[in-house]
Structure formats: C-alpha cells, structure tokens
Image: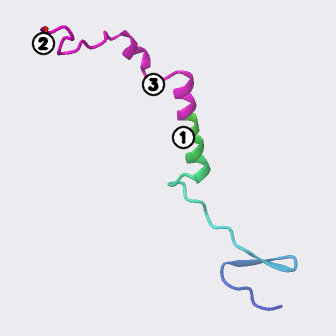
C-alpha cells in the first residue's frame, strides 16, 4: 500500500481529508444570515419603537405662512 499523505486518511479504496476541529469563535455565514433574517422579521412584526414616535406631537413650523401681507 502506498504511503498516506499528512492530513489524509485512507477510507476503503480512496483517500479522504481528515476533519479539522471547528472553531467556536466564529459564526458561519448561514448563522449570520439567519440572525439578520430574525432581526428583520422582528422589525416587520413588532416594529422598533415606532409607537413612541406616533405619540409625539407634530413639530410646528418656525415661520408662519400668514406672516405679513407682502
């Protein structure tokens, strides 16, 4: 049998790369995409504090439209 290169293991009649330990410090692309989707859906269903904006009175203009007859 020929020598198996480093980082590989012989499985039946072919070579297979040895699995590397997954790092727990990074999120996968799918996890980040899922997190973004959850935040977006939360904003669509419950909103992000829009109810506070509805209770505030509308700002009055600083210059009146009927200021003088010129």
Q: Percent x, y for residue 2?
A: 79, 92
The image quarter in which residue 49 lies: top left
Residue toward you, 28 or 6: 28
Of the two numbered discs 2 and 1 on the same chain, state the one appearing first in sequence: 1
> Which residue is identified by label 1?
36
Label 1 secondary element: helix
Q: How many marks?
A: 3
For the rendered model, the colour scheme is: rainbow
**Mark 2 → mark 1, Cα distance in angstroms:** 55 Å
Label 3 secondary element: loop
In the image, the segment drawn in magenta is 39-68
Q: Which residue is found at the position 66% from the left and 78% from the top?
A: 7
Within 10 Å of the Cα at label 1, are there few (<14), some (14-19), or many (20+) other Cα atoms? few
| Residue 65 located within the stretch drawn in magenta | yes
Residue toward you, 30 or 14: 30
> Which residue is identified by label 2?
70
Q: Which residue is found at the position 58% from the left and 38% from the top?
A: 37
**Mark 2 → mark 3, Cα distance in angstroms:** 45 Å
Relative vertical location of residue 9 with respect to residue 58 in this rendering, above or below:
below
In the rendered image, the residue lying farthest to the front is 70
- Closer mark to the observer between disc 2 and disc 1: 2
Within 10 Å of the Cα at label 2, are there few (<14), some (14-19), or many (20+) other Cα atoms? few
Relative vertical location of residue 46 with respect to residue 31 in this rendering, above or below:
above
In the rendered view, does 4 fall on the left or right side of 27? right
């Amino acid at each position: 049998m020929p020598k198996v290169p480093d980082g590989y293991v012989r499985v039946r009649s072919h070579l297979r790369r040895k699995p590397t330990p997954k790092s727990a410090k990074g999120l996968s692309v799918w996890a980040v995409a899922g997190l973004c989707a959850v935040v977006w859906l939360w904003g669509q269903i419950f909103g992000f504090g829009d109810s506070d904006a509805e209770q505030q009175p509308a700002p009055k203009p600083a210059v009146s439209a009927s200021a003088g007859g010129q």
